[in-house]
């Protein structure tokens, strides 16, 4: 069982380009999340999904969009990347939105130049 | 709004010794969960220990234990018999019972000296 996988591991992107970060889990968890990690700020929630077909905004959603077509996949899209989106992005999942424990993927390091 | 504060940006401990990492939080909720996550240089976020607010007994996982002081809103992590592999960034996190997100502190970087 792989748990949560993320792709790519790292990426350098020119400003203005479109980018999709991929996240797949094989635990059949209903809830999934995207966080960004910035030095000195910890992790902050970007978007979440309670279950397939539903999504919601987190603390820092601007400039990002998500979709949840099925249980396993939760891609994060940057429509037009800006340098302030340089960060490490973590996908996480939990059994349900009310379940306490979230499990994290290995992260994607994104640099926007 | 809920907040999580880790006041120790960096800590150091000798191998085989004990170290305590501090965490305080602010909330008006009565139902919530608290966590410690470890992030080694590999970047992976690893759950170390969790505590339900309604439980008075402090959680323990092998060499890791917490001191949960609900009235003081304090949630410290004690690592006993520290090992070189314990060197990492440690994050304290809060989740309200009715919310859908983890609120993280800014982390404490733990160094383990041989």
Image: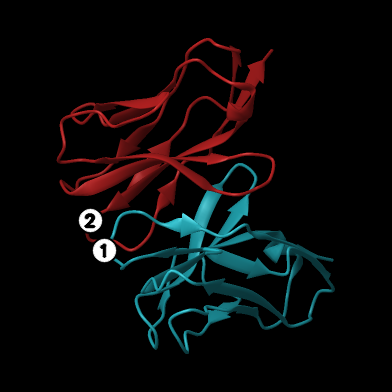
- Give the quarter of the image for residue B57: top left
- Residue B23's x, y, as percent? 40, 30
The chain whose colour is red is B
- Residue A31's x, y, as percent? 38, 71
Q: Is residue B101 left or right of residue B82?
A: left
Residue drawn 35% across and 80% down?
A51
Q: Chain of mark 1?
A: A
Q: Is residue A59 left or right of residue A30?
A: right
Q: Chain of mark 2?
A: B
Category of crowding for the residue at label 1, using alpha-carbon neighbours closer than 10 angstroms: few (below 14), some (14–19), many (at least 20): some
Q: Nearer the viewer, residue A13 or A71?
A: A71
Q: Are marks 2 and 1 on the same chain?
A: no
Q: Secondary structure at mark 2?
A: loop
Vertical comparison of A2 with B85: above or below: below
Residue drawn 25% across and 44% down?
B27
The chain whose colour is cyan is A
Task: Verify CB contact (< 8 Å) between mark 2 and mark 1.
Answer: yes
- Give the quarter of the image for residue B39: top right
Q: Is residue B1 visible?
A: no
Q: Which residue is mark 2?
A: B97
- Residue A101's x, y, as percent? 35, 54
Q: Is residue B43 visible?
A: yes
As measured in the structure, the alpha-carbon distance from the residue carrying label 2 to the one carrying label 1 is: 7 Å
Vertical comparison of B13 with B25: above or below: above
Q: Which residue is mark 1?
A: A98
Residue drawn 39% across and 88% down?
A53
- Residue A84's x, y, as percent? 70, 63
Residue drawn 58% across and 73% down?
A23
Q: Nearer the viewer, residue A97 or A64?
A: A97
Q: Quadrant of the C terminus of chain B?
A: top right
């Amino acid at each position: 069982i792989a748990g949560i996988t993320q792709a790519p591991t790292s990426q350098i992107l020119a400003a203005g380009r479109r980018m999709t970060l991929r996240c797949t889990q094989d635990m059949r968890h209903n809830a999934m999340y995207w966080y960004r990690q910035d030095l000195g700020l910890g992790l902050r929630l970007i978007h979440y999904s309670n279950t397939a077909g539903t999504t919601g905004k987190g603390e820092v959603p601007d400039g990002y969009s998500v979709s949840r077509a099925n249980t396993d996949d939760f891609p994060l899209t940057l429509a037009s990347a800006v340098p302030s989106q340089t960060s490490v992005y973590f996908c996480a999942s939990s059994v349900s939105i009310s379940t306490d424990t979230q499990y994290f993927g290995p992260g994607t390091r994104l640099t926007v130049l | 709004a809920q907040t999580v504060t880790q006041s120790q940006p960096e800590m150091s401990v000798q191998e085989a010794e004990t170290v305590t990492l501090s965490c305080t939080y602010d909330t008006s909720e009565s139902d919530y969960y608290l966590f410690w996550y470890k992030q080694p240089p590999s970047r992976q976020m690893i759950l170390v220990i969790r505590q339900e607010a309604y439980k008075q007994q402090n959680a323990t996982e092998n060499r890791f234990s917490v001191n949960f002081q609900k009235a003081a809103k304090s949630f410290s992590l004690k690592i006993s018999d520290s090992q070189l592999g314990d060197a990492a960034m440690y994050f304290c996190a809060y989740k309200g019972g009715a919310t859908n997100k983890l609120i993280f502190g800014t982390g404490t970087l733990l160094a383990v000296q041989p």
